[in-house]
Every structure is written in structure tokens, then in C-alpha cells.
Amino acid sequence: MPRRNRPQRPPEPSPVGGHGWARAESAPDGEWLVRTVSGNATTKTYRCPGCDHEIRPGTPHIVAWPAADYGSVEDRRHWHQGCWSSRTRRGPTSRRW
């Protein structure tokens, strides 16, 4: 009898310091804790610091905060995925966090 292929589950991310499911990222602009947020999980409107445009409810995006400020909720910022990826190639908007 042929072997059945079982669906593979992606590995679950590990929790970081009680801040939900986040991953550590190292970049030229520092060490970051980063969490990907699905569109289903968003209910508020946020402003992206990369482009200064709104991230509307239902839009998948990134939440990032400096790893040095491990527990600082005030330092978390919501970014469009493309803005987060290109942040080192362009500076933040004139509006500061």
C-alpha cells in the first residue's frame, strides 16, 4: 500500500519574553523584536512610520519594537510589510514616533 503524504505544519514561532509571538531581527538600524499580524487580527487603524499612511483594519502588517526596550509597549510601531522591509533604504517620514 502506498504511503500517504501527511500535511506538514510550519514550525511554530517561539514566544519572546511574554510579548506574544515575536522573532528577533538584527539589521543595520539595530536589534528588533518583530511580530507579523494577520489581517483578521486587526481592528484598529494605525499609522505606518515608514510612509506616514494609515494601516486600516483588516490589513496584514508588522509590529516592531527595539529589542533593547524589551517591555516597552510605547515603543511598538505598526508598519506596512513593504515599508518595514525597505526601512534601511530610506529614512523615516518627518513625523517622528
Image (spheres, helix red, strand yellow):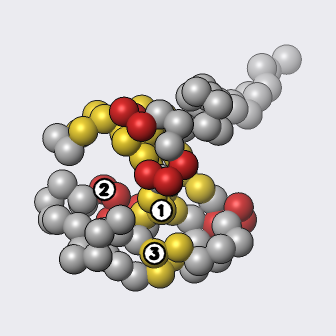
Q: Which mark is residue 91?
A: none
Cα gap from disc 3 to disc 2, whole angstroms: 16 Å
Numbered disc 1: secondary structure? strand
Cα gap from disc 1 to disc 2, whole angstroms: 13 Å
- On the question of residue 54 being in view, the answer is yes
| N-term-proximal mark, 1 vs 2 | 1
Q: Amino acid at mark 3?
A: Arg
Local crowd at mark 2 within 10 Å, few (<14), some, or many (≥20)? few
How far from the left and from the top, in percent, is residue 92?
23, 67
- Asked if residue 6 is positioned above or below residue 51 in the image, the reply reads above
- The residue where tag 2 is placed is 85
Q: Farthest residue toward the right?
A: 1
Local crowd at mark 3 within 10 Å, few (<14), some, or many (≥20)? some
- The residue where tag 1 is placed is 78
Q: Amino acid at mark 2?
A: Ser
Please say if the residues under marks 3 and 1 sit with CB atoms less than 8 Å apart.
yes
Q: Quadrant of the C terminus?
A: bottom left
Query: Of tags 3 and 2, which is closer to the observer?
Result: 3
Local crowd at mark 1 within 10 Å, few (<14), some, or many (≥20)? many
Q: Identify which residue is drawn at 29% across, 69% down.
A: 96
Numbered disc 2: secondary structure? helix
Q: Amino acid at mark 1?
A: His
- Asked if residue 37 is positioned above or below residue 5 in the image, the reply reads below
- Asked if residue 41 is positioned above or below residue 20 in the image, the reply reads below
Q: Identify which residue is drawn at 63% across, 59% down.
A: 38
Classify residue 47 by image quadrant.
Answer: bottom left
Cα gap from disc 3 to disc 1, whole angstroms: 7 Å
| N-term-proximal mark, 3 vs 2 | 3
How far from the left and from the top, in percent, is residue 82?
35, 64
Q: Identify which residue is drawn at 24% across, 74% down.
A: 93
- On the question of residue 25 being in view, the answer is no
- The residue where tag 3 is placed is 47
